[in-house]
Amino acid sequence: MTPTSTRKVVVFSGGSAANSLVDVFNEVIHNSACSVNYVIPISDNGGSSSELIRVFGGPGIGDVRKDAATEFLTLLTGTSELYASVATPQAMLIRSILSHLYLEILKRNRPPSSTFNFQSASIGNLFLTGARLFSGSFESAIYLLAIMGGVDESKTAVLPAIVSNFSHHIAAGLADGSVIMGQNAISHPSEPTALNQTIEEICEHQNVSSLSNGGNTIIEDANLPGSLPTLRRPNIAFSKASEEPLPVRIDRIWYINPYGQEMRPAPNPKVLGAINDADAIIYSIGSLYTSIVPSLILQGVGAAIARPDGPRFKVLILNGSLDRETGSFTASDFIHAVARACIESQGRTIKLSEEIDKDCWKDYVTHLIYLEGDCVPMVDKIELWKHGVESVRLYGRKGDNGTMKYDGKALAQALGAILGKREKAVKSRRNTLER
């Protein structure tokens, strides 16, 4: 066990929901004297990330940094009011990176059929893309953003789950044999999802070598010829509030190449190193199958988490509500999905009808933190205890959309207690967090 003063924690995260817990993790860093490595998937292909992938290729960066056209131009020309609080050397660096990106945008524009769409674009995502194109390295882009943001990487670091300058997509196989291609279509599609296709039917379309615009003009972009149309489709506009429910449960998640074929990518070596050095693993709130599982199914991740001399604490923070991906899931279903993903990362494919030994749950999850309230996933504390998982109940508050929210102070206290340092009792429950 690492000395208390140098505890190390790995957080599997991703998506906007987990962003709301950054302050909680910062409090844990301060109170428990530890450092945190955030492991973020790069399979996002929705929102502004979908347009950046279409034009420039590369990894999905929406989960790494969470109307832009006018703001982009003012930042580019140096006239933005945002520069008022930024040191001149830093402002010049920002302008240089954005200028490089703008030049690349102009080089790739093919009007009228293909021009860059600034709708919903994030300045942070644009900066990361510009830095990646300038340096040739996604990790270097994250490092530069961290420096400019004043992040102390000895205490906090962001690790992309995969180190690559290429796009990595995921697919979901449903219990009825149908397949959904692409993270956005799985989690919050911008249009009704085709759920009646099997993997064989989807692969029949691999000979589609172009994407038609209006049926007349061929769009030239960064996608490889023959890429699946569903992976080339822009997903700029989508709504998380109105989600088409899945007819059946998700069976498993896997990575695919642009033609829909399954592949098993290796993780960022720094991710495995962080897990091997960690005292604790935290699975944060968020979309289970598109934010957490994509990092867990990478080769060797599950084995590193389950090592006898590996992380002592493995904490799952249960969502305060159910979503499109989890339907009617219980807490046991969440844990089962985490365990299954970790097992499959070790080279074993588990069929839907195949049961995994529940006694292995504790190899991947030792503690469950959950909320008491309406519409939260049901928790069977006795069943979890039988299989080595300790349950910690917290009280939150119902948000405007009817879902339960975590109290930041209470959650930080619970995490601190699990890590071995109990904090003073918290009287207030009213500081709610987004989910």
Image (spheres, helix red, strand yellow):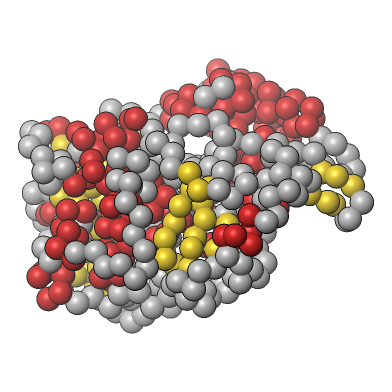
Visible residue check, residue 62 = no
Query: Residue reaching furthest right?
Result: 216
Closest to the observer: 345 or 93?
345
Q: Is residue 312 above or below residue 193?
A: above
Closest to the observer: 310 or 2?
310
On screen, residue 371 versus residue 111, left or right, reads: left
* Residue at left offset 61%, top offset 25%: 133
Spot occupied by residue 421 in the image (x, y as percentages of width and height): 9, 48
Visible residue check, residue 59 = yes
Quadrant assignment for the C terminus:
bottom left
* Residue at left offset 83%, top offset 51%: 212
Spot occupied by residue 289 in the image (x, y as percentages of width and height): 42, 59
Closest to the observer: 366 or 229?
229
Spot occupied by residue 242 in the image (x, y as percentages of width and height): 58, 73
Quadrant assignment for the N terminus:
top left
- The number of numbered badges drawn on the structure is 0
* Residue at left offset 45%, top offset 32%: 163
Q: Quadrant of residue 33?
A: top left
* Residue at left offset 73%, top offset 48%: 207
Q: Is residue 374 above or below residue 359?
A: below
On screen, residue 88 versus residue 8, left or right, reads: right
On screen, residue 386 versus residue 427, left or right, reads: left
Query: Residue reaching furthest bottom?
Result: 374
Spot occupied by residue 16 in the image (x, y as percentages of width and height): 47, 55
